[in-house]
Image (cartoon, rainbow, N blue to C red):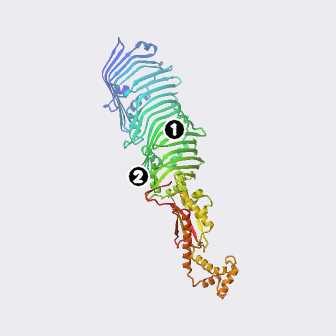
Amino acid sequence: MVKNSPELIGRQVALENLRYNYFTSTVRAHDFKMFEANGEDVFVSFDTLLLDLEPLKFLQNTISIEQFYVSGLFGEIVMEESSFNFDDLLAFHLAEDSTVVEEESEAFKYEISNIEFKDVDFKFEDKTVEKVTEIRDADVIIPFIAWDQNAKSNADIAFELDRGGSFQSSFNFDPESGDFDAEVTVTKLYLDPFFEYVKEYADINSFEGYVDAKVSLIGNAFDPIKTIVAVDARAFDFEMTDTTDQRFLGAEEAHFVASKIDYDNSFYQIDKIEVLNSYTFFQLDSASNNFFRIFRLDEESTQDSTSRNLEAETEESIEYRIGELILHQGALDYTDNLTGEPFEYKLTEIEIDSKELNSDSDWLTINSTMILNGRGNLTAALGINPSDYDNLNLDITVEKFLLPDLNIYTNYYMGHSVVRGDMYYYSNSKIVDGQIVSENRLLVKDAKLETTEGGLYSLPLKFAFFLLTDRNGDVDLEIPVRGDLNDPTLKLSTIIWNTFKNVIDKVVLAPVDFLVGLVGGDPKELEEIVFDYTDTIPGNKQFRQLAKLVDLEQKKDGLAITLNYYVDQDLQNEAIAKNLIGAEFNGEKQDYQKDEEEFQEFVIGKVGSDSLSFEEAIRFLTKDQNIDSIRRARTDLLFKYVNDHLKEEKPTTEIKIEMGDPEAPENIGAYPIFKITYDMLSIPADSTSIN
């Protein structure tokens, strides 16, 4: 047999000893070896084989073995791409022998009891990933296997795995119809032996944890793709680390239950997905994130867009039913370096509990809560059309969010840091056919801002917050967001940022709109105070405006108010000159401003010549007077009366009166006017409280 083994079984074998005891019907074999196709390396070997047969059952067409014992079993499987080191054996035994016509034989039954493999060494080498998996000194005990080639039969197997695990299976098969059902139960199946296979698709340093699973299969051997699978699996102490040994994904326990997986019909009935005490580390940079890098998704995103579109067109729709989706006590560590400085943020106690997530539902709702950086609370509800992601609702509530947590961003983008402050945020967002309509309310309590150098956009956030702060020290801001997400050039983050920036700019550029509510009245009264060219004393209207400014100063602590004076000096000089001559005309109990025709006749008559225009005549009559000096004196007098009235209203007032730049365009064609500007009082400190 040894000599002719290549012709008989397709490989060279070696056998030291083979004995058969006719009285006990036992077969013993020692030191068996089957070599690889090269005839040198060992493929399979064992030290001892013991078969205890029951030959009388042969008469009943039953092959019965009461004991099947093998010790010192060794086997090696080598795989490279899709080839194995036993391919030649398969080809040998499956090849048709045209010279032999087999007679139809009666079907046999098989019964094997007391199967035991002692001191098993098994080696599996995957040359594709350069991974060698070895099982050493394993013992496998299978109590009983029965098989009937005609009737439905079962084969039950059970044995122990390394590190306290176990494997059990039950397999029933009807050879006539091809119907089968199987159940496999595995406990403590450790994941680290599969590390090299996962590493083929991910850049990782470890793949840890173990699995308990029960898998049921029902199908037909003649059409295996229609097999129905049910799974109840739990993973424990799961953990993956990246190439820097940073843990990026883990869970204390995960439970997955699927009562029906029908691959052929793309149907998945998932009863429960539950993850307990999970951990995620997410790192974002300007180009990608750690998950895309680890799982090489960046490489996939560079594939030809045409092939992606073709795949999308040919991809079959998937139907799923998810009974429960639960995440309990999850944690996420977020970090980025988008500003050049590491930003770290922790989300803890993440809770997600949603039910009845079905692919054919018109609407799915997912609820979530979490703790923000150990202090703030977030509650979110996402409603989405599973077949159309361009339609969704998102409600978010954030409470007691600690604003200083965002200082890296506020410094970088706006040139401000937050010394203290709590934020409350309420958002209701709807996306309908890609059009976003989002109503957002931002409530900031007891905030204190600090101005820093720089800022990408130098947004005047501190002054805006100051203007928006109410008497209770709160900022209550409505931020509506609108945009078209169908525009490929537009990003949601850009829409939100531009909206926020526009709101802040609007507050700063039109502060009166936010201050008038404190004192009431017409907002224009807080923008400018206008006089006639010849006024030196404010009238009732101007006094009322000045009183309102003092009232505003008292009600808005820290508000700096400045009255900037502008006037067209040439027009004012003409008005003063006219006023001087008009005083003589008025002395005759007339009013030069009302009796214009009589006044013009008076001026021409006083000159004694009608060759001059009215304006030239006024200048002629006042040529000996220093109109510029008179104008300055009247302006000084007006400043004095305005300042005195402010002091009367409030002796400690800090409202300033300043002369505007005489070259400024605001002077051209202007009546005497105090343009009112607003700012924050300077405090001799690095920071300023907005309340």
Foreground residue, 62 or 130? 130
Element carrying mark 1: strand
Foreground residue, 150 or 449? 449
Q: Where is residue 446 in the image (x, y as percent from the top left)?
A: 50, 50
Q: Is residue 615 left or right of residue 495?
A: right
Q: Position of residue 494 (x, y in %)?
A: 52, 53
Q: Which of disc 1 and disc 2 is earlier in sequence?
A: 2
590 over 416 or under it: above or below? below
Foreground residue, 174 or 332? 332
Q: Which label is found at residue 352?
A: 1
Foreground residue, 471 or 20? 471
Q: How crowded is mark 1: few (under 14 residues within 10 Å), some or many (20 or more)?
A: many
Residue occupied by mark 2: 341
584 over 263 or under it: above or below? below
Which quadrant is home to the N terminus?
top left
Element carrying mark 2: loop
